[in-house]
């Protein structure tokens, strides 16, 4: 999802050509960059932005699924959904920590999100209208995230790459539990089947938009590829995702809502229909159906938790004072 | 009262017999909460049986700018490695 974090990134750097060339040489040799190493300001800025947005996506991503925890149809499903949402919180934390190694604080990042200055993945601004959406999100949204995140495990920035390895290990459970939910519905009553198809109809296009604009329209992509922040282009990743997903949908007997989707023998992959980029840009700019609710809910969680943070700090200070007095 | 919740580094021992290894960091107001949060965040799938948390400010790190003078000299000291010394075959494995 997370290639969206690079949209509008400013990769310009102020350093000397010699410095930039020496840095590029390290990157080309596949040396990882660690937090205190010298790095171009554009590299640092791009990563702070991308990792921050990635972290926000994990945290905001808890909301559409949290919506269904109390209404999960069985205890088995509820336990799995709870575990998944907890994982997303953990992923957010790994990522905030990775961003913090670059000199930005957790507090700054939180404020940026709550004030609506930071972006997060467009996908989370769509509503979760039925239980089937829990399946479709795991299958498609987490599936698309995995496609994006596996190459990020080899990102040139060490802390981000390490966080991604941890995230990817956990992500596979998310996708499988989602596919299982959709499979159960697809093999169920006609009404359940209909629910699965409706959900797929609503999530397919937003899912393939997660990979971001076409390569021909994505600025700064070259610099980010050269710095090995990114390893594959948006279109390459989207193609991989579609090629992997079509047979999965066929197995379920569900139809992907794209009449132009067909196998292209020459390229050895599927061709897809035209993506509605007006919708994509509107959602990215905050006009998605749930955009206002998401930020409102995050603000509420932050404000409702204020007394807990204050009490914990006060308690820690009191314990510290007692410890000092006893010495 | 400062509003910044302190940062902690988390180390986990995967199983007895292995060393604790750095796995990441987190924010917590004190060591009790840091341990609880580390357990929730870093050990959800049997990652280990022991956790250390250390305030990040307590860590002193070597300066990356001095990495060359610190670590490169060892490259020249090949006599520190067993393969530097020639022992005849007939002596057997040593």
Image: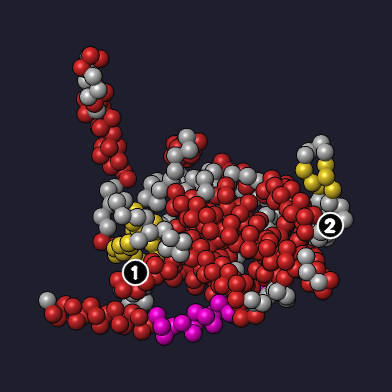
Instruction: State if disc 1 and disc 2 touch (CB < 8 Å).
Output: no
Q: Chain of mark 1?
A: B
Q: Quadrant of the C terminus of chain A?
A: bottom left
Vertical order, A1 against A17 (above or below): below
Q: Chain of mark 2?
A: A
Q: Of tags 2 and 1, which is closer to the observer? A: 1
State which quadrant residue A168 falls in: bottom right
Does the image show residue B33? yes
Per the picture, the main secondary structure of the magenta-coloured stretch is helix
Q: Bounds of the magenta span?
A: A291-309
User: How far from the left and from the top, in percent, is residue A204?
Assistant: 76, 61
Binning the other alpha carbons within 10 Å of mark 2 as few (below 14), some (14 to 19) or many (20 upward) gives some
Q: Which residue, given by chain and number where applicable, does mark 2 sit on?
A: A258
At horizontal 44% and vertical 39% (from top left) the residue drawn is A31
Q: Does the magenta run of residues contain A298?
A: yes
Helix, strand or loop at mark 1: helix
At horizontal 58% and vertical 69% (from top left) the residue drawn is A80
Does the image show residue A282? no
State which quadrant residue A128 falls in: bottom right
Q: Is residue A114 left or right of residue B36?
A: right
Instruction: Check if mark 2 and mark 1 are on a common chain.
Output: no
Q: Which residue, given by chain and number where applicable, does mark 1 sit on?
A: B35
Helix, strand or loop at mark 2: loop
């Amino acid at each position: 999802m997370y290639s969206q974090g690079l949209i509008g990134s400013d990769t310009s750097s102020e350093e000397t050509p010699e410095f930039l060339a020496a840095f590029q040489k390290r990157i080309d040799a596949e040396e990882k960059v660690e937090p205190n190493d010298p790095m171009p300001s554009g590299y640092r800025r791009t990563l702070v932005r991308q990792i921050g947005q990635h972290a926000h996506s994990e945290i905001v991503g808890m909301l559409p699924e949290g919506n269904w925890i109390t209404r999960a149809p069985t205890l088995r499903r509820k336990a799995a959904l709870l575990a998944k949402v907890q994982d997303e919180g953990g992923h957010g934390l790994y990522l905030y920590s990775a961003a913090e190694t670059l000199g930005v604080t957790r507090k700054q990042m939180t404020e940026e999100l709550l004030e609506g200055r930071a972006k997060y993945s467009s996908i989370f601004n769509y509503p979760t209208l039925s239980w089937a959406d829990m399946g479709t999100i795991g299958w498609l949204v987490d599936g698309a995230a995995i496609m994006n995140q596996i190459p990020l495990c080899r990102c040139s920035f060490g802390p981000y790459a390490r966080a991604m390895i941890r995230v990817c290990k956990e992500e596979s459970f998310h996708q499988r539990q989602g596919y299982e939910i959709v499979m159960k519905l697809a093999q169920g009553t006609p009404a359940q089947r209909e629910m699965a198809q409706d959900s797929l109809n609503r999530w397919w296009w937003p899912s393939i938009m997660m990979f971001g604009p076409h390569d021909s329209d994505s600025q700064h992509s070259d610099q980010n590829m050269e710095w090995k922040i990114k390893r594959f282009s948006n279109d390459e990743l989207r193609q991989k995702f579609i090629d992997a997903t079509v047979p999965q949908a066929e197995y379920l007997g569900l139809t992907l809502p794209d009449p132009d989707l067909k196998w292209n023998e020459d390229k050895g992959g599927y061709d897809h229909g035209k993506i509605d980029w007006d919708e994509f840009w509107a959602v990215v700019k905050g006009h998605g159906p749930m955009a206002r609710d998401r930020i409102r809910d995050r603000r509420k969680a932050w404000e409702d938790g204020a007394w807990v943070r204050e009490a914990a700090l006060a308690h820690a200070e009191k314990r510290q004072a007692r410890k000092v007095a006893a010495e | 009262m400062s509003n910044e919740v302190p940062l902690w580094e988390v180390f986990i021992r995967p199983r007895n017999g292995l060393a604790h290894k750095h796995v990441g960091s987190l924010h917590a107001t004190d060591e009790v909460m840091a341990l609880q949060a580390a357990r929730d965040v870093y050990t959800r799938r049997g990652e280990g049986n022991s956790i250390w948390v250390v305030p990040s400010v307590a860590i002193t790190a070597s300066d990356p700018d001095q990495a060359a003078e610190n670590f490169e000299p060892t490259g020249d000291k090949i006599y520190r490695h067993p393969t530097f010394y020639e022992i005849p075959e007939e002596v057997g494995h040593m």
